[in-house]
Amino acid sequence: MSEELRDRMLQAELEPQLIDEFISLGRIKKVSAGQVVVSPGSQNTEMPIVLDGLLKVMRQDNDQREILLYYLEGGETCAMSITCCLEGKKSSFKLIAEEDSTLWMIPVAHMDSWVQKYPMFRRFVFAAYQSRFDELLETIDSITFLKMDERLYKFLLDTKQATGSFSINMTHEQIAKQLNTSRVVISRLLKQLEGEGKIEQHRNKVEVL
């Protein structure tokens, strides 16, 4: 797995010396689909880099309602994790494995020195911030400007792109929870999208056409 990390980080154009430090100081972590990697209110000492699989970053309110912010794929890390780690803050988000995934966990105690010592790592961190910021703007735009049927179809398309599969293995209840609406609304809108020829529905699965 250390070689997979090396390949991922070389693709990100990080310094070979930094990659060696990642390998010597980090550790591998395997998570199953549905497993919580970071919980709201937790104090994190490690930053995850996705080697394989897919994670999703969720925001949760006091009533346990959730909304999807963005996905993390192979070679990516979570900008929100970096911020919490650098500032010593407790997590304000939830990080969940969307599918079985392999992570490389890096201790954040070295983050400050790495940012100063390695220009390409500094660029990597800034790029992570920019990418996540752009995705957060898309989320805000969809909530503010799109009707629920448009939000639902965008969610299905985004999930298809993130997972690389036309089949989305989620129940109506699970989709409703991620879009912060009711199951009845989602069921009605999925039926509408199916009538428009955009999706097909199966048991606990939606197929994007």
Image (cartoon, grey):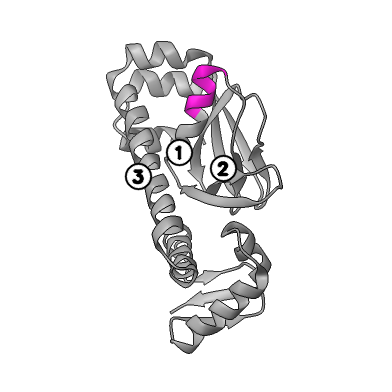
Q: How busy is the neighbourhood of tag 2: few (under 14 within 10 Å), some, or many (20 plus)?
A: many
User: Can you give x and y, in whole percent of width and height, for residue 147 in the image?
Assistant: 45, 68
Mark 3 / mark 2, whichever is N-terminal: 2
Percent from the top left, x then y, of residue 8?
39, 38
- Image-based side of 185 in relation to 3, left or right: right
The answer for how far apart the CA atoms under marks 3 and 1 are is: 28 Å
Q: Secondary structure at mark 2?
A: strand
Kindly identify which residue carries mark 1.
4
Task: Single out the residue that lies furthest toward the bottom.
Answer: 195
| Quadrant of image for the C terminus | bottom left
Q: Residue 4 occupies which quadrant of the picture?
A: top left
Residue 103: numbered disc: none
Amino acid type, residue under disc 3 in the picture: Asp
Amino acid at dot 2: Thr
Proximity of marks 3 and 2: CB atoms separated by less than 8 Å: no
Looking at the image, is 124 positioned above or below residue 72?
above
Q: Are marks 2 and 1 in contact (CB under 8 Å)?
A: yes
Name the residue furthest right: 63
Q: Residue under circle 3?
A: 134
Amino acid type shown at disc 1: Glu
Give, as a single range, the part of the protein colored magenta.
Answer: 82-88
Can you tell which mark lies on residue 102? 2
Give the total number of marks visible in the rendering. Answer: 3
- The answer to whether one can see residue 2 in this image is no
Q: Nearer the viewer, mark 2 or mark 1?
A: 2
Task: Tell whether label 1 touches label 3 (CB within 8 Å).
Answer: no
